[in-house]
Image (tube, coloured by chain):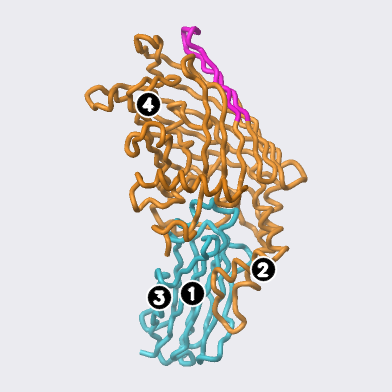
C-alpha cells in the first residue's frame, strides 16, 4: 500500500516538475509554509512548528489548480547563512550550546538569529475569490523568518552530552582504518546504522528544545489580472511564535506534545465587500495557538487563530485548521489539512500534499553526483 | 589531491593544526605515512564533536622528508542538521590545515572538492587531506 501511495505521488510530482526549471532538484520541492504564503492565508499551517531554513528551497503550490506553473504560483526560500562559508561553525553553536570549562551548557540563546534566518518569495494566482484573496489576482509576497531564542533545557543538554561521547567512539570504530585512512562514507553509514549504541545516541538528538521563540515578517502586493499597472498594497505583517515542548520535560523519547502560541499584527487592505470587491485599509491582530502531538510516524495538530480588526468587529473572523501528517519514510511525508480559513466567502481549507527530501537519491537525476 | 609543504633539512619542529567548520558532528584523525606501508598515528580530535585538532608536533624537519600527513575527518549530520541542508553542509564545508616550521613558515591548506565525499543519503561526509612534506 505504501509503495502504491509513493508511486501515485511520484507520478503527480513528475507532472508538476515538467514545468519547473531543470536545475531545480526534486528534493528542493515541498508544500510551502513560508511567511510569504502565511501572509496570504494560503499556507497549510499558519502556526508552524520551529524548523530550520534551507539554503534554497522552491515550493510548488497548487500547480494543478489552474494549469499554469511558474511564475504565477510559486514560492522559494533562501537562507543567506548558507551562501557564506562560516569559518568557525560547530555543532554546539548550531544547537545553541556551549562547551566552555569542559562542560556542555546552554549557549548563546540568540545564536540562531543569523544561522536560521530565511527569506522567502511567493506568488499565488487564483481564478476565483478564496478567503481574503480576489479572483484573477496575482499575489506576490516577500517574507523572512528566523529563530530568535532557543533554550535547550537540562534534559536535552544532558542527552546531547551523553550522545556525543557515544557517537565519537562509534564513529572512530566505524570510520577510521587501523592502518590509516578513512572508510567509504556509504560503508560508514551502513556500519553506524547497524550499531545499536550509535542509533540510541542519535535518537537522543531528536529531543526538541524546551523553548523556542521564532519571529517572521512578510509583505504582499496584489496584481489584478497579473498586470503591473494594477498593483496595490495587499497586506503586511509581523509575528512571533513561542513553542513549549513537553518532550524536554518527559522521560519518554518517542512522542512529543508541543504547544505553540502565536501573536501577529497585520496591516491589511481588507476585502469588505465581496460583490463589489471593495477594499479598505485596516489593522488586524491575530492571536491563537496550536497543539501538536507526534508519536512515531504520525502527528496530529489543531490550530485556532482569532483575527480582530481594529475599530470594527464586523470583519473579525477565525481560522481553525486540523492537520494530519504521516511519515512514510525519511524522504516522504503525506500531509492532509482541513478546516475553516479567515473570511466568510469560500473559506474552506482542504489541502493534501506531500513533503519530500530525497537527498542524493538516484531518483533525482539532476542532482546525482 | 596531495599538496606539498616544503621543509628544511634541519631540527625545526613541524606542527599541524586542523580546524573544521561545520554544524555537523565531526571527528578527525591525523596519520603520518612514512612509507607506503607504514603509518603512525599523530593526533586526533578531542571527544567533543567539533573535529578540530589543536596544534600538534609532527616531528623534526630532517626526519620528515617525503612523509605524507593525512588528516581524515568524518562528519555526521543525521538529526543535527535538517535533511534539506545536508547538501549545503557538504558544499560549504570549510577545513583548514595549518602547518608551521617549514621553509616558508606558516602555511594554510584548505580542503579541495576532490578531498570530500558524502554518502548516498548525504548524512555522512568524509574529508581526506594529504599533504606531503618535501625538503626544499
The number of discs equals 4
Could you tell me which quadrant the C terminus of chain B lies in? Answer: bottom left
Quarter holding residue A190: bottom right
Q: Quick check: can you spot residue A56?
A: yes
Q: Are marks 4 and 2 on the same chain?
A: yes
Query: Mark 2 and mark 3: span between their CA atoms?
Result: 34 Å
Query: Mark 4 and mark 3: span between their CA atoms?
Result: 62 Å
Disc 3 on helix, strand or loop? strand
Q: Which residue is mark 4?
A: A126
* Chain containing mark 2: A
In the visual, does A115 lie left or right of A228? Answer: right
Q: Which residue is mark 2?
A: A170
Query: Mark 4 and mark 2: span between their CA atoms?
Result: 53 Å
Q: Position of residue A13 (x, y in %)?
A: 45, 45
Q: Quick check: can you spot residue A78?
A: no
Q: Which residue is mark 3?
A: B106
**Which chain corresponds to the colour orange?**
A
The region drawn magenta spans A302-322
Q: Are marks 3 and 1 on the same chain?
A: yes
Q: Is residue A314 magenta?
A: yes
Amino acid at each position: 500500500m505504501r509503495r502504491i501511495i509513493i508511486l501515485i505521488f511520484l507520478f503527480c510530482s513528475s507532472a508538476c516538475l515538467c514545468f519547473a526549471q531543470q536545475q531545480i532538484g526534486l528534493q528542493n520541492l515541498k508544500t510551502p509554509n513560508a511567511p510569504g504564503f502565511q501572509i496570504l492565508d494560503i499556507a497549510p499551517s499558519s502556526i508552524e512548528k520551529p524548523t530550520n531554513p534551507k539554503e534554497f528551497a522552491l515550493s510548488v503550490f497548487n500547480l494543478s489548480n489552474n494549469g499554469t506553473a511558474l511564475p504565477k504560483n510559486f514560492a522559494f526560500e533562501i537562507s543567506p547563512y548558507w551562501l557564506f562559508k562560516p569559518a568557525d561553525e560547530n555543532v554546539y553553536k548550531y544547537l545553541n550550546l556551549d562547551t566552555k570549562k569542559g562542560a556542555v551548557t546552554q549557549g548563546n540563546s540568540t545564536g540562531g538569529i543569523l544561522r536560521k534566518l530565511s527569506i522567502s518569495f511567493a506568488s499565488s494566482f487564483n481564478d476565483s475569490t478564496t478567503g481574503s484573496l480576489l479572483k484573477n489576482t496575482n499575489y506576490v509576497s516577500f517574507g523572512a523568518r528566523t529563530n530568535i531564542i532557543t533554550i535547550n533545557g537540562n534534559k536535552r543538554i544532558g542527552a546531547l552530552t551523553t550522545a556525543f561521547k557515544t557517537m565519537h567512539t562509534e564513529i572512530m570504530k566505524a570510520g577510521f582504518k587501523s592502518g590509516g585512512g578513512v572508510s567509504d562514507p556509504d560503508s560508514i553509514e551502513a556500519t553506524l546504522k547497524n550499531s545499536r549504541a550509535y542509533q540510541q545516541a542519535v535518537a537522543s538528538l531528536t529531543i526538541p528544545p524546551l523553548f523556542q521563540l521564532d519571529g517572521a515578517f512578510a509583505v504582499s502586493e496584489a496584481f489584478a489580472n497579473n498586470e503591473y499597472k494594477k498593483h496595490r498594497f495587499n497586506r503586511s505583517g509581523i509575528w512571533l511564535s513561542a513553542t513549549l515542548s513537553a518532550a524536554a520535560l518527559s522521560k519518554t523519547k518517542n512522542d512529543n506534545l508541543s504547544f505553540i502560541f502565536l501573536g501577529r499584527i497585520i496591516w491589511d487592505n481588507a476585502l469588505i465587500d465581496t460583490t463589489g470587491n471593495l477594499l479598505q485599509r485596516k489593522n488586524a491582530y491575530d492571536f491563537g495557538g496550536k497543539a501538536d502531538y507526534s508519536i512515531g510516524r504520525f502527528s496530529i495538530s489543531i490550530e485556532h487563530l482569532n483575527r480582530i480588526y481594529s475599530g470594527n468587529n464586523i470583519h473579525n473572523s477565525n481560522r481553525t485548521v486540523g492537520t494530519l501528517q504521516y511519515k512514510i519514510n525519511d524522504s516522504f511525508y503525506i500531509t492532509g489539512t482541513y478546516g475553516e480559513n479567515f473570511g466568510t466567502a469560500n473559506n474552506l481549507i482542504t489541502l493534501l500534499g506531500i513533503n519530500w527530501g530525497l537527498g542524493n537519491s538516484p531518483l533525482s537525476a539532476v542532482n546525482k553526483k | 589531491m596531495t599538496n606539498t609543504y616544503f621543509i628544511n633539512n634541519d631540527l625545526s619542529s613541524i606542527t599541524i593544526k586542523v580546524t573544521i567548520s561545520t554544524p555537523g558532528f565531526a571527528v578527525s584523525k591525523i596519520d603520518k605515512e612514512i612509507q607506503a606501508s607504514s603509518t603512525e598515528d599523530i593526533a586526533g580530535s578531542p571527544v567533543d564533536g567539533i573535529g578540530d585538532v589543536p596544534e600538534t608536533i609532527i616531528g623534526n624537519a630532517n626526519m620528515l622528508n617525503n612523509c605524507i600527513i593525512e588528516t581524515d575527518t568524518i562528519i555526521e549530520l543525521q538529526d543535527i542538521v535538517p535533511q534539506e541542508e545536508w547538501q549545503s553542509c557538504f558544499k560549504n564545508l570549510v577545513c583548514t590545515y595549518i602547518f608551521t616550521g617549514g621553509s616558508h613558515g606558516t602555511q594554510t591548506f584548505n580542503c579541495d572538492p576532490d578531498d570530500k565525499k558524502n554518502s548516498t543519503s548525504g548524512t555522512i561526509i568524509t574529508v581526506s587531506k594529504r599533504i606531503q612534506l618535501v625538503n626544499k
